[in-house]
Amino acid sequence: MDVWSSLLDGFATAATPANLLYALVGVLLGTAVGVLPGLGPAMTVALLLPVTFALEPASAFIMFAGIYYGGMYGGSTTSILLNTPGESSSVVTAIEGHKMAKAGRAAQALATAAIGSFIAGTIGTVLLVVFAPVVVKFAVSLGNPSYFAIMVLSLLAVTAVLGTSRLRGFCALGLGLTVGLVGADPVTGQQRLTFGLPLLVDGIDIVVVAVAIFAVGEALWVAAHLRRTAAHVIPVGQPWMGREDWKRSWWPWLRGTAYGFPFGALPAGGAEIPTFLSYVTEKRLSKRPEEFGHGAIEGVAGPEAANNASAAGTLVPMLSLGLPTNATAAVMLAAFTQYGIQPGPLLFDREPQLVWALIASLFIGNLLLLLINLPLAPAWAKLLQIPRPYLYAGIVFFATLGAYSVNLQAFDLGILLVLGLLGFLMRRYGLPILPLILGVILGPRLEKQLRTSLQLSDGHVSGLFTEPVAIVVYVIVAVVLLWPLARRLVRRTPAAGVGAVEEREKVEAR
Amino acid sequence: MSVVVGYVPTREGETALDHAVREARSRGVRLVVVNTSRGDALVDERYADDEQLAALGSTLADTGVDHEVVHTIRGRDASEEILSVARERRAELVVIGLRRRSPVGKLLLGSTAQRVLLDAPCPVLAVKP
């Protein structure tokens, strides 16, 4: 009962007129950046970080949550109407969604995406309410060594499991950890990587890093690769669904939710894998497999539910452990630090009002999103007519303004440009962005846990293995790291076996 | 010599095309239809897609006028594109469609028609639907 009364308190905070307004602004912005390919919720939250310093933390996070959920809704509109995914999590939606639109069923595709997102988002948020306090109860019993191990695991999992190349992932992670090292040593006060520049002693502000990598890097990338095209948006009427469409959408929505939530909560889950799994499952279970590839409504309903459920799942480790599992959560976590709030298992105890208002606002945001997306999808598609140079000029302007306003230091603008160039080069050479951002944000906290553990054990490395949870997590880390090697060995063993048999035959033949 | 017309798949564009066909026929010259986009937005409804292009082609074939369609994305404004085609083909007349604009709309957005009117090397026929 305790949880539910806290949630009701949260609703009381989130439902004040001012906070409802921030939720509305958040979902509108989120949908807009979701519709536009190349712009995502992570970049938007990063750009808004400096602007929201003046707000109450609760209001700011209500807005950020709206942006996060809104991005998931908006991505599907572009996928369906233009066959260009607005977000990476709606890549799968484009497969069936665009075929449906071409067959004149755009309205039904948009409706099943919006309603599915609403149902999955709501169920996911209920699951968040149920699971987050349980995880917290478990997490507060953990000591520094276990915490350190879990952070190492989440960094490695994101780096090694996502993306095409482990090497590139680890390069990006290394860059991120290095950027996180800049500044004074938290224990001894020694200067690290400051190159004698006094302005670097305080470290590089996370806002500047996020804005540079997401906004400036992306703007440079688009400027270098502006492809000249002019497509048409497929016209839609008012979204509506027939009885048959409802019947065919229900189970995919629920199954998509079941895939999305746990994957969102896992360190290496993200939204892409569950959407793909959901698509494959629906294709296999469908009574009309021949329709897949020609516009099957199940292929839109399942993945769209999965990506929203994963958005809710992501918030479980973020709120209960302080561990981000995707870029948007990472930037939101950076926002906590900006407000001087320590993320981690104690967040629920220390900032109950903020956390529960955030969770309550997710329910409100979901409802708002359903209301603004169901009838207005064609209007949102009009955003795609904005010439991209105007759009990116605006983004660079806001990025510069934001980076300067953090410390009112012109020096930060230099850092913004240098890191923006780094973001561009990373995109150019296919380095994933997420490990870098996680490295910058988790690096200093990782170091703190490590230093504390080692101080407790008087500098003995064995102090890192004193807790059973830590040892279990290290075993998982070892499996994740050695998996490619093991797989190669397994593949080689039968071949080696064959060789041995041949050897023996040779011996016997003699 | 030729008649150049700026075409967009809207009512204004169709009206401009009608007048251009009439002019080209009476002058006995070739008709050059220009449809273009700067191509820097993901979506541009003024740039004809394959279907609209086919419809345009059959409309032009029905008129029996000697014609040519310039359908390009070169990162230039519609006005620049129309004017450069007009110079290349030594146009004796440029035809454009005008649309109704509110005073605020005129203030906010640069007008393609205005630039064509001011910079064209030849007489310009501006028609309203």
Image (cartoon, coloured by chain):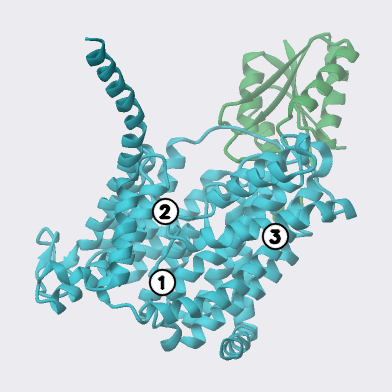
Chain colours: A cyan, B green
Task: Categorize mark 3 by other alpha carbons within 10 Å: few (<14), some (14-19), many (20+).
Answer: many
The answer to whether mark 1 and mark 3 are in CB contact below 8 A is no
Residue at (71% x, 48% y) in the render = A300
Query: Does A178 appear above or below A331?
Result: above
Instruction: Pick whichever of labels 3 and 2 is earlier in the sequence.
Output: 2
Query: Does A159 appear above or below A28?
Result: above
Query: Does A276 appear above or below A493?
Result: below
A152 left or right, relative to A344: left
B122 left or right, relative to A398: right
The residue wearing badge 2 is: A214
The secondary element bearing badge 1 is classed as helix
Query: Which x, y percent locates residue A210?
Result: 38, 59
Q: Amino acid at mark 3?
A: Leu
Q: CA distance from mark 1 to mark 2?
A: 15 Å
Instruction: Pick whichever of labels 1 and 2 is earlier in the sequence.
Output: 2
Instruction: Pick whichever of labels 1 and 3 is earlier in the sequence.
Output: 3
Q: CA distance from mark 1 to mark 3?
A: 32 Å
Which of the labelled discs sits on residue A308, or is there none? Answer: none
Q: Amino acid at mark 1?
A: Ala
The residue wearing badge 1 is: A335
